[in-house]
Amino acid sequence: MNSQPKSNEFLINKIYQKVLDEIDIGIHVVNTEGKTIIYNKKMMEIESMEIEDVLNKNLLDVFSFDQNSYSTLIEALHHRKVIQNVKQKYYNNKGKEITTINNTFPIIDQDVQLGAVEIARDVTKYERLLRENLLKKGDTKYTFESIIGSSPNIQEVIEASKRATRTNSSILIIGETGTGKELFAQSIHNGSLRAPKPFISQNCAALPDSLIEGILFGTKKGAFTGSIERPGLFEQADGGTLLLDEINSLNPNLQAKLLRVLQEKSVRRVGDTKDREVNVRIIATINEDPIDAIAEGRLRKDLYYRLSVVSLFIPPLKERKQDIKELAQFFIEKYNHLFAMNVKTISEEVIQMLHDYDWPGNVRELEHIIEGSMNLMEHEEVISYSCLPIQFRKKPQFQVETPKHIELEDLFQQKGKPIKPLEQYMEEAETFYLKKALQQHDFNISKTAKALGMSRQNLQYRMKKWHIKKS
């Protein structure tokens, strides 16, 4: 007679445990003594702990808090307080820093305190990203720890850059677009004695010559119609670092004036007769071979020699392909936080594709590929071929073998006449295949997407692109 209730209770407990372990949020429950009685798998992952290290132990014996901080769980337990959306920083028993956003509630039944429960979201990695400024462009918090890559090529540049932090010499950073030149510039500034002083960046190609001169060197009131008394970037960066991006975009006259500032260590505002001393370290970047820029008149030879006291060559991504997986994983973590997703990794097929590609856009292009892929995903945890942006999959080196069910003879014209362009043929092949798959599943989007190994969103995107509709 009593076996049935026990069986139901056992089943319910199993269900509860399964639910607790599968939800993607941390759950931590303590009793009235502050001892842990429920601790789910996600919480173990967030806090890098094993369940036996926490279960049935007092919370304050396992975790530590800064002097001016406190445990939200203990606060809810002792004061019967509901605490919502509070950021908490604390440390596990190995000293690892953990940061979470918590919703914490006392557990009360008929005015009797039973314990407290905490629902936690992990923001440890997100906090680290914010500190390193990898989610904010234009700020000055990049450090050498922000640079991803263990290949010899990139490590050699990192070591040379670290040595350059000890001096005030001018630096010329040479690298293709998207290789991370500003990342190195900020890292050098933050690793030097100039770190407490300003870091100012100016893209020389972003403004016309009529404006860039006043911005760089400052203006005197009345020098021209509408001019005001304003310090230039050299004065604003006094004591710190001035990054001049795409230095080869400056016209020769401005390059000559820049050379004078570097040699005299003083600047004269536009329309002024007074020289003002400045103490600024110059870091310049160029996205082409400086010898070519000199030969074609885009860079003065004397300015090149003055800037290139230290020359750093940032390798393109095609020369450091062993870093691709590490970089891709980093971008996955970044966009997981931005998009509130839970993508784990990349399939081996996609990794091979990334290695086979030449990366004309370098690291920036890789980031865009990861971001684009995650925009096309729904609940998948692995970036597969079907998740990749269509423009990437249509690169010539990734075109798959012609489907056997399409007769090639039908795609060729009579002898002596031109055949169809490859791109047109691939569009027709994909349209044909998608239509057949949709017809086979009665145009059920979910079933068709599952059969094709892609997300609903990806399939709907392709249907819209190729104008596929149910007849």
Image (cartoon, rainbow, N blue to C red):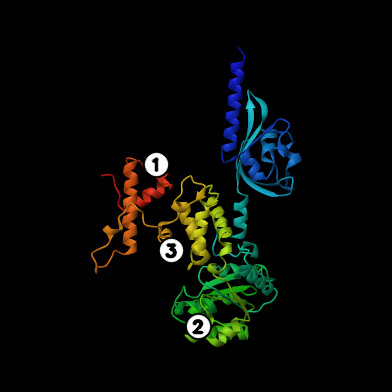
Q: Secondary structure at mark 2?
A: helix
Q: Secondary structure at mark 3?
A: helix
Residue under pointer 3: 397
**Which numbered mark, 1 or 2, is in the foreground of this view?**
1
Contact? badges 3 and 1 (CB < 8 Å)? no
Residue 98 placement (x, y as % from top left): 67, 48
Residue 275 placement (x, y as % from top left): 59, 84
**Alpha carbons under labels 1 and 2: distance apart:** 55 Å
Q: Amino acid at mark 3?
A: Gln
User: Crowding at label 3, few (<14), some or many (≥20) Cα neighbours within 10 Å?
Assistant: few
**Alpha carbons under labels 3 and 1: distance apart:** 30 Å
User: Crowding at label 2, few (<14), some or many (≥20) Cα neighbours within 10 Å?
Assistant: few
Q: Secondary structure at mark 1?
A: helix
Residue 143 placement (x, y as % from top left): 64, 64
Res 297 label = none
Q: Nearer the viewer, residue 155 or 440?
A: 440
Residue under pointer 1: 446
Q: Amino acid at mark 1?
A: Ser
**Which numbered mark, 3 or 1, is in the foreground of this view?**
3
461 lies above or below 105: below
First-in-chain label (3 vs 1): 3
Res 292 label = 2
**In the visual, does 79 lie left or right of 8?**
right
Q: Residue at x 71, y 38 (%)?
A: 54
**Alpha carbons under labels 3 and 2: distance apart:** 30 Å
Residue 344 placement (x, y as % from top left): 55, 49
Work out whether residue 271 can be spotted: no
